[in-house]
Image (cartoon, rainbow, N blue to C red):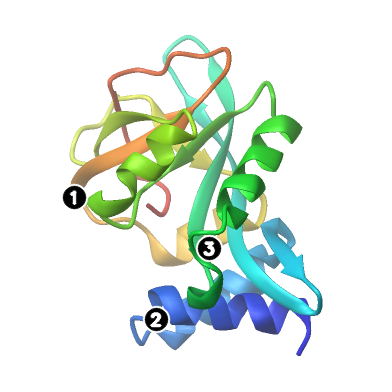
Amino acid sequence: MNAKEQCKKIYLEAFDDGDDSFTKMLFENCFEYCRYSVSGDTVTAMLFALPCELVCPTHSINTIYLYAVATLKDYRGQGIMSELIEKIKKQSQNTLLLLRPIDNSVISFYKRLGFKETAVDNRTSGLPFVKPLGGYRELAKAVGCDGESFTAMYFSQTERIPSKISFKDSMP
């Protein structure tokens, strides 16, 4: 099984909601942004580092949206995902990292890695918003975003982001 197939297997193990069309679009449009860890011949953890920018009233911030962060069940708790995220942080020193925790149980994990919480309000226009780029833009156009609000997290060594942002034109 090649790396793409293994990443897809990890994705489905963690996030399968029965929407095969979305999974197909994600892996067709965005696999080039997939980052993963390997042990021997096994992909043990994966995530998508999707290119975007946070558009603010006076400037834009180069941003990577970490999406579908997942580790194989047998490899969890070994620091593999922490290492993968730290590697991305090093490679992206002047870039804002954003993510949406799958649920509240993982917020403390991200906080240990230096991430901070911010509110997302997709019902309000005019807020700083996430603008997808590259293959992520094509996926976001196809999928869209509903009007929900939620908590996102960010990491930046240089930027302090606004207290509310929007994913209204992208995919949370």
Q: Nearer the viewer, residue 60 or 23?
A: 23
Question: How far apart are the two marked residues, 1 and 2, measured between alpha carbons?
Answer: 21 Å
At horizontal 31% and vertical 30% (from top left) the residue drawn is 117
Residue 50 drawn at (x, y percent): 60, 49
The residue that disc 3 covers is: 139
Could you tell me which secondary element the residue under label 1 belongs to? loop
| Disc 2, SS | loop
> Pointer 3 and pointer 2: residues touching (CB < 8 Å)?
no
Q: According to the image, label 1 marks what residue?
A: 148
Q: Which is more foreground, mark 3 or mark 1?
A: 1
Residue type indicated by callout 2: Asp
Quarter occupied by residue 110 = top left
- For residue 81, side relative to residue 94 (left or right): left
Callout in the foreground (3, 2):
2
Give neighbour class at mark 2: few <14, some 14-19, many 20+ (Cα, 10 Å). few
Measuring from the top left, give residue 168's x and y in whole percent: 33, 44
| Marks 3 and 1, how far apart at CA | 19 Å
Q: Which mark is residue 16?
A: 2
What residue is rendered at 53% in x and 34% in y?
97
Asked if residue 167 shows in the view, the reply is no
Neighbour tally class for label 3: few under 14, some 14-19, many 20 plus, Cα within 10 Å: many
Residue depth check, mark 1 versus mark 2: number of the one nearer the observer: 2
Mark 3 vs mark 2: which is more N-terminal? 2
Residue appearing at x 69%, y 24% in the figure = 93
Percent position (x, y) of residue 91? 75, 34
